[in-house]
Amino acid sequence: MKGLFSIEVQGLTALERQLTDLAENKAVKVLRDAGRAALAPVLDDMKHNAGYDAKSPGPHMRDSIAITSTNRLSDTKWITVVTLRVGPSKEQTMKALAQEFGTVKQVARPFMRPALDYNTSKILRILAVQIRAGLSNS
């Protein structure tokens, strides 16, 4: 099955040239801050639609959903300047997968993919504005 989702981004050559001119750690800060701001709407949607059982005494999946980042300066296994992830913690991964895709006994109630799909244009818009602001402040 061919991918159902694609994003085309133009102007990356000019962006790469400007980022190369910055010190790499400054580039990491600009991209990390812009990415976190851009993923905030996804974070809110995921938390809003994640399963929650008020009767459950244990930790709730929606409380563990966060934006995390890594970069090639702190972890050499990554080749990207910055990698951002929004989702539940590792401890809640099985619950998240069960809700997203369903199980034999549980109907799927996706909350991760719809949060990303619904906010794609907003993510790109915020990312562009934040990167532009970060570059002009440098």
Image: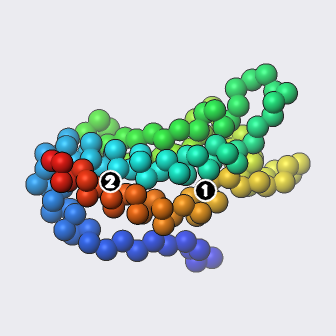
Q: Dot 1 surroundings within 10 Å: few (below 14), some, or many (20 or more)?
A: many
Q: Is residue 135 visible?
A: yes
Q: Earlier in the sequence, mark 2 or mark 1?
A: 1
In screen coordinates, is 44 left or right of 38? right
Residue at 26 percent across and 72 percent down: it is 11
Residue at 71 percent across and 55 percent down: it is 110
Which color scheme does this rendered protein use? Answer: rainbow
Query: For the view shown, which residue lies furthest in the bottom direction?
Result: 2
Q: Is residue 80 visible?
A: no
Residue 63 pos. (x, y %): 63, 32
Q: Nearer the viewer, residue 118 or 87?
A: 118
Q: Tell me the quadrant of the picture where the N terminus can be found.
A: bottom right
Residue at 20 percent across and 41 percent down: it is 25
Measured in 3D between alpha carbons, the distance from the residue under mark 2 to the one under mark 1, in whole angstroms, is 20 Å
Which label sits on residue 115? 1
In screen coordinates, is 123 left or right of 73? right
Residue 69 pos. (x, y %): 40, 41
Mark in front: 2 vs 1: 2
Amino acid tagged 1:
Ala
Q: Nearer the viewer, residue 78 or 10?
A: 10
Q: Name the element at disc 1.
A: helix
Please determine whether, in this image, residue 11 is positioned above or below residue 77.
below
Residue at 85 percent across and 27 percent down: it is 55
Amino acid tagged 2:
Gln
Residue 22 pos. (x, y %): 13, 50
Q: Name the element at disc 2.
A: helix
Q: Dot 2 surroundings within 10 Å: few (below 14), some, or many (20 or more)?
A: many
Residue 138 pos. (x, y %): 15, 47
Residue 64 falls in image quadrant = top right
Q: Nearer the viewer, residue 113 or 118?
A: 118
Q: Which residue is mark 2?
A: 130
Please determine whether, in this image, residue 15 is positioned above or below residue 47.
below
